[in-house]
Amino acid sequence: MELSGSAAIISGGASGLGEAAARALAAAGSAVVIADLNDERGKAIADEIGGQFVKTDVTDEAAVTAAVEAAAGGTAPLRVVVNCAGIGWAERTVNRDGSPHGLAAFRKVIDINLIGTFNLMRIGAAAIGKTEPADADGQRGAVVSTASVAGLEGQTGQLAYSASKGGIIGMTVPAARDLSAIGVRVNTICPGIIDTPIYGTGPAADEFKARLTAPVVFPKRMGTAAEYAQLVRAIIENDYLNAEVFRFDGGIRFQPK
C-alpha cells in the first residue's frame, strides 16, 4: 500500500516505538496523527514531522473517536492504524510475602494494553472502511499492532503484561478475517528487548542492558526503535502480508527469570 498521500494514526506516538513509527511514516509521505497522553512531547514531535497531535487516552472511547476523526478529517484518506500505546508491570501471581497479585494493577494493564489496542483498532478500521479502495484488490488500509514476545513466553512476574500482549496476538487472525470485508489488513509485531529511553543511561544502565541481551542469539545487542519502525513500514507496504504475527527479537527465547 502506498504511504505517500495517506493518513496514519499512531497511539503512543510521543515516545519509544510509537515515535519511531511516526517519524518513519511521516518520512514516507503520510500525514501522521500522534495519539498520546504526553502533550509536550507529542506536540513537539508532531511539529517536527509536520503532523498533528491529539491528546488521547486509548481506554476512552470518546477520546479515541476524536483522534480518529482528526486523522480522517484531513485531505488525505485514513489508511493506517499503528497501535503502540502500552505500559509494563511486574508482579507475581502470589508475591513472596504471600499476598495475591493486585487485581487493580492487573486490570489497568489489560485496560491500556489490550482494550486500548482493540479500541483504536475497531474505531480506526471503521473510519478506514469509509474510504474509497486504494487499489484493484479493494484494499483500503492496514492495522499494525504491537504485542511482545512476553505474550508468547512470559517470564516470572509478567502475568498481567503477558496476558495483555497475548490477547493482542490472539486478536490478530480473527480481526484480519473480520476486516477483510472492508479491505483492511491486520498484522502484529512482537518485539523482544528493544533499546528505548526507559532503560536510562550510564554505567548501571549499560550493565543492566548487557544482562538483558545475554539470551539474544544474533545480533548480540538490543533491537532499535528505528528497526521496529522499518518493520512497520515494510508490513504496511507489502500488500500480501495479512493475519501474521512477527517476532522481532534477534532470536531471543525468554528464560523463566
Image (cartoon, rainbow, N blue to C red):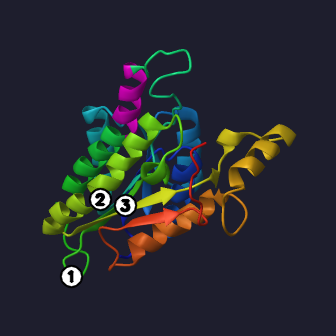
164 w.r.t. 131: above or below:
above
The residue positioned 35% from the left and 68% from the top of the image is: 244
Taken as a whole, is the magenta stretch helix, strand or loop? Answer: helix
- Give the CA distance from mark 1 to mark 3: 19 Å
Determine which residue is flagged by label 2: 172
The numbered dot on residue 7 is: 3
For marks 2 and 1 on the same chain, the one whose residue lies earlier in the sequence: 1
Q: Nearer the viewer, residue 228 or 233?
A: 228
Determine which residue is flagged by label 1: 137
Which of labels 1 and 3 is toward the front?
1
Q: Residue furthest left?
A: 181
Q: Does any portion of residue 31 appear in the rendered image? A: yes
**In the image, residue 108 lies in the stretch drawn in magenta:** yes
Q: Does any portion of residue 70 appear in the rendered image? A: no
Q: Nearer the viewer, residue 24 or 44?
A: 24
Q: Nearer the viewer, residue 135 or 240?
A: 240
- Give the CA distance from mark 2 to mark 3: 22 Å
104 w.r.t. 222: above or below:
above
